[in-house]
Amino acid sequence: MAGIDRPTRAVRSVVRAVTPTSGAGPRTIAEVVAAYAEHRGRPIDVRRQALPVGVFGMWLKNDARDLLLVSTGIATPEQTLAHELGHLVLDHPQGCSSDPDAGKAAEAEREAESFATMLVRRVAAGSTAGSVDAVVDELLG
């Protein structure tokens, strides 16, 4: 798909996965996460907890499940949850953005934040409900 960046394709994929053919779609990012976990057949746990200063969220995985951690005391938990989901969906390598390969880490952070911003906007606008074609048109449009 020439001209469409990875975060846009990833949001499209998630929206298609979690949008029912009829009825209302997810209304919160947490509902998107739950629906996406069900779609892919692998649990995704979400936890709010204190994290080190400067760390807003984190994605961890093991053989059985994924874990999205969101720091307590932040002003934008939905954005952070969507950002961490972006790392998962975009299959970024595990690790902290302060990893030695700053170029790749910075690109992964940009992709995850772009994904999060698009997804939060779609959910806030109610764009996960209705026809998939309408959602895709809105995402590309």
Image (cartoon, helix red, strand yellow):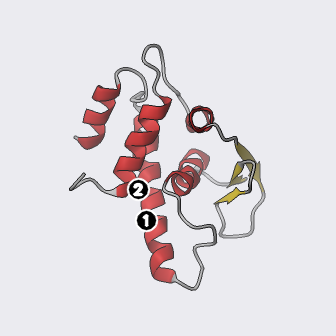
Q: Position of residue 3 (x, y in %)?
A: 21, 56
Q: Position of residue 89 (x, y in %)?
A: 51, 51
Q: Residue at x 43, y 52 (%)?
A: 115
Left or right: where does residue 16 sit relative to residue 93?
Answer: left
Judging by the rendered image, the residue that carries numbered circle 2 is 114
| Near-viewer residue (53 or 19) | 19
- Which amino acid type corresponds to the residue marked 2 in the rendered image? Ser
Judging by the rendered image, the residue that carries numbered circle 1 is 110
Q: Residue at x 33, y 31 (%)?
A: 135
Q: Secondary structure at mark 2?
A: helix
Q: Residue at x 50, y 30 (%)?
A: 18
Q: CA distance from mark 1 to mark 2?
A: 6 Å
- Which amino acid type corresponds to the residue marked 1 in the rendered image? Arg
Left or right: where does residue 72 sit relative to residue 17?
Answer: right
Q: Which mark is residue 84?
A: none
Q: Position of residue 94 (x, y in %)?
A: 62, 67
| Near-viewer residue (12 or 79) | 12
102 to 8, vertically: above or below: below
Q: Position of residue 5 (x, y in %)?
A: 31, 57
Q: Secondary structure at mark 1?
A: helix
Tell me if label 1 and label 2 are in contact, CB under 8 Å. Answer: yes
| Near-viewer residue (3 or 55) | 3
Q: Residue at x 36, y 48 (%)?
A: 9
Q: Does the rendering let one see residue 112?
A: yes
On the rendered image, what quadrant is the C terminus found in?
top left
Q: Quadrant of residue 139?
A: top left
Furthest-bottom residue in view? 100
